[in-house]
Image (spheres, rainbow, N blue to C red):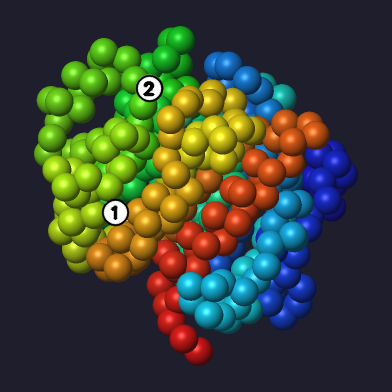
Amino acid sequence: MAEERETGWDPGSFLGLAMPYCDCRTAGAVVIPAPYEATVSYGAGAGKGPAGILGASRQIELYDRELDSEPALRYGIHTEPPLAFAQGEAAGAVLGRIAARVAAAAEKRRFFLVLGGEHGISPGVFAGLVRARPNERFDIVHLDAHADLRDSYEGNPRSHACAARRLLDNPACGFLWQFGIRSLCAGEAAFIRKNPQRVRTWFAEETIPHPDADWRRELAKGLAGKKVFLTFDVDALDPAVVPGTGTPEPDGLAWRTALEICRVVADSAAETAGMDAVEAAPVPGLHYSEFNIAKLLYLMMSRLMPGAAASS
Ligand SMILES: [Mn+2]
């Protein structure tokens, strides 16, 4: 395909799955690579994230110790060819094409994992879900170091720094549950305080087990019976776990906390329709970021996908 040649893409499948486990006709999950990078404000490289994650994912054991099975072989994961973006392509057109891919997966009730790319793509991902499933509402679980609640950043309302605010603009967005936040501006802090009926933010230090801050119980209660979309900025994790990201922040989420959040979502929500993972920016010669992200994504999928963790 011309698209693959233009981007120099080696379309390895997620986890290196071979047929029939990556068959587009039967897979329960779809991976959509969206290497879009336009509004990055600090370190660049998010456009190389999907290829880095897919490459690293081939090294991951399919056996999931907690589930005592190889869940990917049960549900199947199809990896689509990457979206290709033209230099200077309008952001609205980019988000529209991402939305079309997501809608096609969501219409078939397939769990989707969109690999960014910068966080600016998330409103397009969510729009695709809403297009496929109109008249439904979804709570959004948002893992990030940054609140991303600015109405505009550097004059651009579609900036990666505004991703969560744009998600809230969508009428199909219910409640926004934020985890791992540790960097925000005064205006974002005020927005959080003024909108307790729409946003609940757990700062990174509040996710450490503590008797006065039991986020598990509150999240489980809040998500009971709800449908969920999850947006995962990999800088939510501590930079010791994932140094390869454009705007790293110290003192982030522990690996096991990120996984625990997914367990609570899986146990309490009615359904998680899909997710994205954004802002992975590979650092040459330092390959463990992409491995850690890929492994966490596999563990997350196997818990969040409807029916994925069920024993065969
Ligand atoms: Mn971030």
Please, what is the three-letter code of the amino acid marked with disc 1?
Answer: Phe
Q: Is residue 78 above or below residue 244?
A: below
Secondary structure of residue under mark 1? strand
- Does ligand 1 reach within 8 Å of label 2's beta carbon? yes
Please, what is the three-letter code of the amino acid marked with disc 2?
Answer: Ser
Is 246 placed left or right of 141 in the picture?
A: right
Tell me if residue 191 can be seen: yes
**Residue 180 lies in quadrant:** top left
Direction top: furthest residue: 154
Q: Is residue 66 above or below residue 190?
A: below
Residue 310 picture location, percent across and down: 43, 82
Between residue 267 and residue 130, name the one nearer to us.
267
Residue 158 picture location, percent across and down: 45, 25
Tell me if residue 123 can be seen: no
Report the residue marked by disc 1: 138
Between residue 200 and residue 169, name the one nearer to us.
200
Residue 116 picture location, percent across and down: 59, 41
* Label 2 environment density (alpha carbons within 10 Å; few <14, some 14–19, many ≥20): some
- Between marks 2 and 1 in the image, the one whose residue lies nearer the viewer: 2
Between residue 58 and residue 130, name the one nearer to us.
58
Sequence-wise, the earlier of marks 2 and 1 is: 1
Q: In this view, does 138 lie above or below 118?
A: below
Instruction: Identify which residue is drawn at 43% across, 23% down.
Output: 161
Query: What numbered label is drawn on residue 183?
Result: 2
Between residue 65 and residue 178, name the one nearer to us.
65
Is 134 placed left or right of 9 in the picture?
A: left
Residue 124 picture location, percent across and down: 47, 41
Instruction: Identify which residue is drawn at 44% across, 67% down.
Output: 303
- Does ligand 1 reach within 8 Å of label 1's beta carbon? no
Instruction: Identify which residue is drawn at 52% across, 62% down.
Output: 299
